[in-house]
Image (tube, helix red, strand yellow):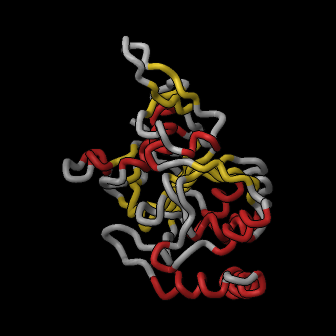
Amino acid sequence: MRQSMASISVDEIAAEIKDGCQLAMPVDYAGVPMAMIGPLLRCAPRNLHLVGVPTAGLSFDILIGAGLVRSLETSAVSLGEAGGAPCFMRAMARGSIHMKDSTCPAIHAGLMAAQKGAPFTTLRGLIGTDILLQRSDWKVMQNPFSAEPDPVVAIPALHPDVSVFHAPMADREGNVWIGRRRELATMAYASRRTFVTVERIVDRRLLDDEVTAAGVLPNLYVDGVALAEKGASPYGLWGEYPPDIGQLQRYAQMARTEEGFAQWMSEVYA
């Protein structure tokens, strides 16, 4: 049995994100690790390649606005009901970042291929879309099991260097409860390293509880857990607290200009 895992800090997680890191974070409803963004801004790793699983929002927009991002791969960057992601849209208009346009199924497919140790997996739904014109790394191939013409798209395995997400709780062995957010498990399985921020660390072993065991990511796939109360805010966290729509709207309004973004940053991360 694995012994107690020493808790780390969000600053220590941020220090593991090096220049050129391929960093994956989840969609806004699945535990965005917002508590890590301030420490990451202080560490200021350069030329990050971000992966949104399968979409991205505020965390990506802040890092792009701070000039830390070289490229990103995701199916969308948006603030949801608060509107578009201003820093992302400015950077795309200027050509200062490279966007590897994807789809939600393709992001998940690439991660699942990595999880299974396969070099690629295939999707049929991309056939006939113009996104194939933008992705030279996706290959159209004939289904080898069909005698009739049956093209499919080969999606290469997606191996993030580091994945980070926020969850409700972990136990002292580092087992993390993710509930039904199984995409978080896929991220961890596919990534070379995984760090998690949590609302609380509990004394009971989560894998011993029949109620929680099925929703647990085992510590085998977790490299460190940091305590961070309200660590997803201003996003919400399932079963814990709702999103702060007012704060998201305020960011969306201020970040429409570079001056407004700088002011917001000085207020929030001074």
Quarter of the picture containing the C terminus is: bottom right
Specify whether 54 is left or right of 218. right
Q: Nearer the viewer, residue 201 or 89?
A: 89
Q: Please state the total of marks drawn on the protein image.
A: 0
Picture quarter containing residue 132? top right
Q: Nearer the viewer, residue 172 or 235?
A: 235
Q: Answer yes or no: is residue 100 visible.
A: yes
Residue 98 percent across, percent down from the top left? 73, 53
Q: Nearer the viewer, residue 88 or 129?
A: 129
Specify whether 54 is left or right of 136. left
Picture quarter containing residue 269? bottom right
Please tell me which residue is depicted at 26% across the width and 45% down the height of the picture.
214
Please tell me which residue is depicted at 35% across the width and 58% down the height of the picture.
203
Quarter of the picture containing the N terminus is: top left
- Against 62, residue 266 (above or below) is below
Please tell me which residue is depicted at 54% across the width and 27% down the height of the picture.
140
Residue 253 percent across, percent down from the top left? 61, 87
Specify whether 10 is left or right of 200. right
Please tell me which residue is depicted at 56% across the width and 45% down the height of the picture.
130
- Against 151, residue 111 (above or below) is below
Residue 152 percent across, percent down from the top left? 46, 28
Specify whether 98 is left or right of 114. right
Q: Answer yes or no: is residue 173 visible.
A: no
